[in-house]
Image (cartoon, rainbow, N blue to C red):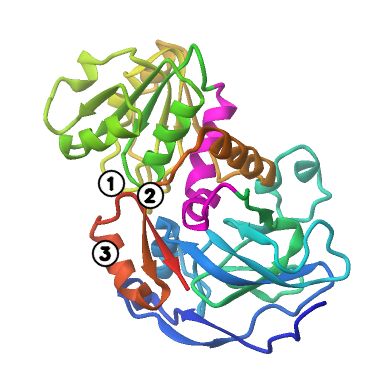
């Protein structure tokens, strides 16, 4: 049985960049036309991601207003298209930062669907028919059933929601670079992304986990999350030299100014890699080529994760009983949540609940 289609949805609609300052308006909007490949679900939880702020403010470039952000969405299926396989009414599912791709190009067929040239992001994007994609600061979500992921029964919705973007964004580069026994991992920035990087590196049984932050204010949290060492870059001018060669994989979650690339690269041992997952609005600072050359280092980037990455991540989370550090806030308070997020208050992810 399928519920009757809703002509409009309700959610927090942004009309211009002022929305990032807590000026979203609760109002109706028109979702994409329902197709036989789509599902619809009633949203119970939606994580708050830094991408939401960058998009609301047009920080990454002009956004396509009006828009509804939110791409860590969980809810219960209320409608299923006739061509959808694997989902039924009542299932608990989640949608992350990507909600569509062509599924047939070389990239999609070879495990790189996140790089599909026809990919649809979950908000501030368009589907192939030209209709807008709207996110999860809302009551309902509608979109391709192929991109809805079943949530393991053992993981509560508020714990699972931020994993759909924040979690998989760091899980992907960890597993891609063989993080596990025999590898030492460094995490730059202990925030929404960084805390997941520590949790997953610990679950993957890495030999050593080092957290790098500006001050020691989060040292206790880092150790409780599973870190072995903590470097406070603002409290020791010799930090880069003292800790040279201490890690093999370095995941940078920093999205603000002041990324000290040369000094971070010095933390890597021979053949190591620095993977950038944070997405600053400004260009990365320049650095000497010799920082890479003398130790055969690599510099890379990583974009969210595929549906298979998300499924594998949830399997690990369920097996290892990984718990996101979250604070649940009411969906009706979303504007204040954005203000608190910008002030750096979450420890370490906010989750909106209907």
Q: Is residue 80 left or right of residue 223?
A: right
**Location of residue 216 by image quarter:** top left
* Residue 283 point in image, percent of width and height: 38, 46
Circle 3 crowding by C-alpha within 10 Å: few under 14, some 14–19, many from 20: some
Report the residue that reaches farthest toward the right: 83
Q: For the magenta stretch, what is the residue range?
A: 154-178
Q: CA distance from mark 3 to mark 1?
A: 20 Å
> On the picture, is 191 further left or further right than 250?
left
Disc 2 secondary structure class: loop
Q: Mark 3 or mark 2, which has the lower sequence index?
A: 2
308 and 247: which is toward the camera: 308
Image point (61%, 58%), residue name: 94
In this image, 161 relative to 253: left or right? Answer: right
Q: Are marks 2 and 1 in contact (CB under 8 Å)?
A: yes
Q: CA gap, disc 3 to disc 2? A: 19 Å
Residue 76 in picture, x, y percent from top left: 64, 67
Q: Which residue is mark 2?
A: 280
Q: Inspect this view and state whether residue 135 appears.
A: no
Residue 157 place in picture, x, y as percent? 52, 57
Mark 3, mark 1: which one is toward the viewer?
Answer: 3
Q: Is residue 276 above or below residue 291?
A: below
């Amino acid at each position: 049985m399928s519920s009757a289609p809703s002509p409009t949805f309700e959610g927090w609609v942004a009309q211009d960049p002022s929305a990032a300052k807590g000026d979203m308006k609760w109002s109706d909007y028109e979702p994409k036309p329902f197709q036989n490949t789509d599902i619809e679900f009633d949203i119970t939880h939606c994580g708050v991601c830094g991408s939401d702020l960058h998009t609301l403010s047009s920080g990454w470039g002009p956004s396509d207003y009006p828009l509804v952000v939110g791409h860590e969405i969980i809810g219960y299926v209320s409608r299923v298209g006739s061509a959808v396989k694997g989902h039924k009414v009542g299932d608990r599912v989640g949608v992350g930062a990507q909600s569509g791709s062509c599924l047939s190009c070389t990239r999609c067929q070879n495990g790189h669907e996140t790089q599909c040239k026809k990919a649809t992001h979950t908000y501030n994007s368009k589907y192939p028919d030209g209709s807008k994609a709207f996110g999860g600061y809302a009551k309902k979500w509608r979109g391709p059933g192929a991109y809805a992921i079943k949530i393991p029964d053992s993981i509560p919705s508020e714990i699972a929601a931020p994993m759909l973007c924040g979690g998989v964004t760091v899980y992907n580069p960890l597993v891609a670079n063989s993080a596990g026994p025999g590898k030492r991992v460094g995490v730059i920035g202990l925030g929404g992304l960084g805390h997941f990087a520590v949790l997953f590196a610990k679950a993957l049984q890495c030999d050593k986990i080092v957290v790098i932050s500006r001050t020691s204010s989060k040292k206790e949290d880092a150790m409780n999350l599973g870190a072995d060492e903590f470097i406070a870059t603002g409290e020791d001018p010799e930090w880069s030299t003292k800790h040279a060669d201490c890690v093999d994989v370095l995941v940078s979650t920093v999205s603000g100014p002041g990324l000290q690339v040369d000094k971070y690269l010095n933390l890597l041992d021979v053949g190591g890699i620095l993977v950038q997952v944070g997405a600053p609005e400004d260009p990365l600072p320049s650095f000497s080529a010799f920082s890479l050359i003398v130790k055969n280092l690599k510099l890379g980037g990583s974009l969210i994760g595929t549906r298979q990455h998300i499924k594998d991540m949830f399997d690990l989370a369920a097996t290892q009983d990984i718990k996101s550090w979250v604070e649940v806030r009411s969906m009706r308070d979303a504007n204040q949540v954005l203000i608190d997020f910008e002030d750096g208050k979450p420890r370490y992810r906010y989750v909106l609940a209907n």
